[in-house]
Image: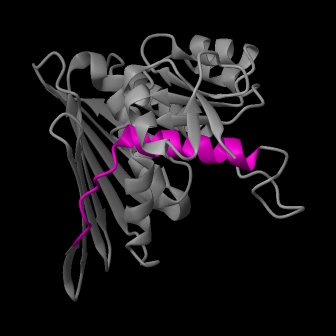
Amino acid sequence: MTVRVFADHAAYRQALGGFARSATAVLTAHDSVAALSGEGEWPTRVEEAARAGAVVAVVDDPAAVSQEALDGLGALAMPIVLQRPRLRHDLAGAATSARGGSTVRAVVVECAGGEHERAGLLADAVGWAREFAGGELMLRSAEGTAGGLVCLLEGPGGLPVTVMFTGLDAPRAGGLVRVSVLGETRSEVSVDPVAGVADLDTVTAAGTLRAAPRHESSHRGALGRGIRAARAGDSGHDRPEGQPLDRPHDLDNLRHDSALAAEILDVAHRPR
């Protein structure tokens, strides 16, 4: 089955070249994977694609938007794949798998970026903590600092999570994220999309294992997920009889991460 792809974004038009055997470019969103820009009010573009008959939406680096806008997308029937460059789907999966089931004792996430990137960066930091915690997080405390903020979260089973944000003067630094997961096995993740850094180290008693470099771009990875979602939803063609459609959880995850990031900002900057 060849999947139709409506790439309304230059990065996805370039990534589409790697899917010559499984996808074909089309000029309208009808019956296609709609690959869209995540700038500005991107939920409006997703809703327009859905009305035009798209079967899957793939969104590049979704900007911070209101919780109401995200909640509105939850009513759409089509799957939505979100390409979050500081929280790559493949890197998060590899990071959690590399732990081999070792218990997570604590998580510390540091992020840094410009003021306009703060809400999105905090959401990605929360997302990394959620991935390693294995579930939703709750805010316990937050406090603003001279250069940013620090907050304490709690994960399933009372897991302690610390998230710190440092503001940078650079107007568009792109955002940096560093994750440290403590326990009998230690995980270290560093992500800097502008510099092309996406490093993963897993430390055990046997030594340090650095994951192989990721040569596939995050755009190609996200588009591939969208194409697979479209194929899986095509009359059940690609899944065994009786097995439900495996929808991406990207939107639900972003709703959780963004809501908690907004709560952190609100509490940290309340007058004291």
Is there any visible trace of residue 270 in the rendered image? yes
At 44% from the left and 46% from the top, the residue drawn is 221
Which quadrant of the structure image shows residue 270?
Answer: top left
In the picture, the quarter occupied by the C terminus is top left
Report the side of 76 relative to 254 (left or right). Answer: right
Vertical placement of 253 versus 67: above or below? below
- Depth check, front residue: 28 or 133: 28
Q: Does the magenta portion include 8?
A: no
Where residue 238 appears, as percent x and y from the top left, is: 75, 56
Vertical placement of 87 versus 270: above or below? below
For the record, the magenta segment spans 210-233
Which quadrant of the structure image shows residue 94?
Answer: bottom left
Report the side of 46 relative to 272 (left or right). Answer: right
Where residue 89 appears, as percent x and y from the top left, is: 45, 49
Return the residue found at the far right: 242
Q: Does the magenta portion include 211?
A: yes
At 57% from the left and 39% from the top, the residue drawn is 23
- Depth check, front residue: 68 or 237: 237
At 19% from the left and 33% from the top, the residue drawn is 194
Magenta span: chief secondary structure: helix
At 44% from the left and 11% from the top, the residue drawn is 40
Is there any visible trace of residue 141 in the rendered image? no
